Structures are given as structure tokens and as C-alpha cells.
Amino acid sequence: MSKNKEFVKFEKVDKSYDGKILVVKDLNLDISEGEFITMLGPSGSGKTTCLMMLAGFETPTNGEIYLDKNPISNIPPHKRGIGMVFQNYALFPHMTVYENLAFPLRVRKISKDDADKKIDKALSMVSLSGFENRMPGQLSGGQQQRVAVARALVFDPSVVLMDEPLGALDKKFKRKHAI
Amino acid sequence: MQYEIKHIHESIGVTVVYVTHDQGEALTMSNRIAVFNDGKVQQLSSPDQLYEKPVNSFVAEFIGENNTFAGEVYDISKDMCKVKVNGGEILANPISVKTKGEKTTVSIRPERALINPKSSMDNNHKGKIEEVIYHGDHTRVRLSLLGNSDFILKVPNSSENLDIKLGNTINIGWNSQDARALDPK
């Protein structure tokens, strides 16, 4: 089966926060199924706004975004089937690693047996098998970020969004070591 | 962690949209990179195309290092143009320029300029060594060349013994195809 070349499609997307200045101007961008695409640019270039519109936390001022051919502007973030790892999208600190990963599965009403299998698989993917009962505070910054990646992948999303996931790591690392 | 994310992507084939301001991360992990500036995608390319063939001055400047010369086109054909710069003329690859008299910024990656090139290159100039910094795997050399006192070379340390000493004047060559005449900055 050939891959969908327009799995994610931005079509003539503009975004303005104040009705005057466009922070995203006439964006046309097709992303293939299975592709790893990076939006790279300086602060204020519009890259994060594009990601937020795809995630559903912002709405395009003009234009439309399609996911697997369906327009998504009217679909709320949690119903888009998109996994997210954001710089400020931290783990739930009062939940174990297992509970953090179980959360998106419970929201999607996955049975416990299936959930356990998915959690096993996701933790093994980020080399954290056996960490199920740890609390986030007992993990290093890098380990926490790997749990966040596992949590974004655990419900088999078709798309995963990552916003500076390693940038956050650096800062945490610096904070931890700065005295 | 960069490699880890890359390997996870390769093993499960999920579509990933990744945002960063770190070009190293972008070049390492991506199939394609969309370079954003001022609300617009400046270039959408694979990492190697983006680095080797930037389509405008913003991308050339933002990704990696580049040596630049501001000048004016005074002769142009399909795949070659002559650019008059402060200290002389450069043969360049006309990417964003079309006609005589246009202002341009010529961009050359540091590793594309060679000292005493063995094969013939269509740009040959003398440069004076202003600074030499040893970096282990390569030596970074800053030259004054054609009025640009910030012309950078990266010389691999496997190179034969070259006369890289402060104050020396050396011959530098590059191919016109690697000197990209882009929009003026």
C-alpha cells in the first residue's frame, strides 16, 4: 500500500493573534505518512504556532488543516488522536510511571489487559522496562523525558508532535547542576 | 536522546512533527526540514539539500556556517555569474539573481574553500591568515580575503602539512558551483 503523501496537510493557513499581524502567512505544507518532519526557525518565526494549530490548541485564522484527508479545525485536541511531547507538558508528579502511561489509555477506554501490553511495549521502546512503579521525582530529567515520549506513543497515535523536547532537558540538566 | 527518538521513529513508523530552534537536532533526526522565518516556510528540503543548497540568504545563514560577500552582478549566463565585490570578482552560481546590476550576497560553505587546491578551480584568490584555532579533528582558519576579514576555512587535520601560520598569505580556491549568489542581506 502506498503511503499517503498528504497525511497531514496545511492548506493556505494564516494565523493572527491580534487581527493585524500574521504570525503564520499562507502556509501550504504536506507531510507524508511515516515522515519525520522538523519545523526549524528562530523564536517568533511561527513554527510553534503551526504545531499548536495542528495539536488543536490554536485555530487557524484562515485556511484549513487536514489529518488523513479530514479537516480538523472543529475537532478538539484530545479527539485528534495525536501524541504530544511538549517542553511544558510534564508528567503527572503524583502518579507512578505506570499510571502516567495508563492515563491516555484509560481516557480512550482501553481494557486493562490491552493497556498493560501497550505500557510494556512503550516502556521497552524507551529502554525503561521495570520502571513502572517509580514516581517521576525519582527519575533523572532524561528518564522523565523518555517517559513523556512513551506516554505520547502508548495509545498508538498516527502522529506525534514534539516541541523542543530536548531543549527542556538541557534546562533541567543545567538547573540540576547549577549551584 | 536524539538518536533514541530517531530510532523509535524508524522502528514504529509513526509520523513525527518536531519543533526546534536547534539545527543540529533537525539535521540529525529529520527526513525533511521546514525552515521558518517571519511566518513563512523559507525552504522545505532534506537535511543535505538544506545545507548544501540553501535557496536564500536566510537559510544559508541560519543553517551551518557560511562565508559571505556582498556584491553586484556584472555578467550572467545560465549557470554562471560574475559578481563584483569589494576586493575583486567572484565567479558564482546564480541562484536568486537573474540580471546584470542586481545586488547579491554570495555564500560559500567553509569546507568548500580549499588551500592550494590540486584540481583546478575557477575561483582562485590570495588570503592572509588572521587567526588559527586548533579544534582536534580540524583547524579553523580565519582569513582576510577579497575585503572579507572574516573568511573561515575548516582544514581537516588529516590534511598534509599546509603552511598555516599566522600572517602567511595562502592560495585559496573554490568552484563557482559552490559559491551561491543569493538575495542581498
Image: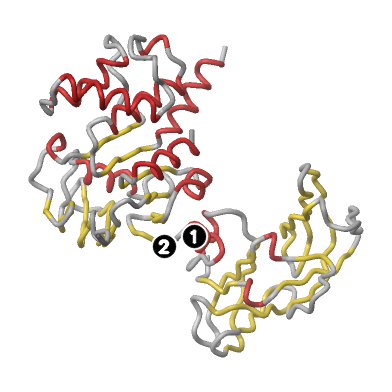
Q: Residue at x 50, y 28 (%)?
A: A170
Judging by the rendered image, the residue that carries numbered circle 1 is B59
Which chain is mark 2 on? B
Asked whether A146 or A110 is in front, the reply is A110
Relative to residue B15, is residue B111 depicted above or below? Answer: below
In this rendering, position of residue B87 left or right of residue A166 = right
Disc on res. B14? none
* Picture coordinates of residue A7, whole percent (x, y): 23, 55
* Picture coordinates of residue A100, whole percent (x, y): 26, 18
Q: Secondary structure at mark 2?
A: strand
Q: Residue at x 77, y 72 (%)?
A: B173
Classify residue B92 by image quadrant.
Answer: bottom right
Q: Residue at x 41, y 21 (%)?
A: A128
Relative to residue B177, is residue B78 depicted above or below? Answer: below
Asked whether A156 or A29 is in front, the reply is A156
Classify residue A122 by image quadrant.
Answer: top left
* Picture coordinates of residue A56, whole percent (x, y): 18, 41
Q: Are marks 2 and 1 in contact (CB under 8 Å)?
A: yes
Which chain is mark 1 on? B
In this rendering, position of residue B71 left or right of residue B8 = right
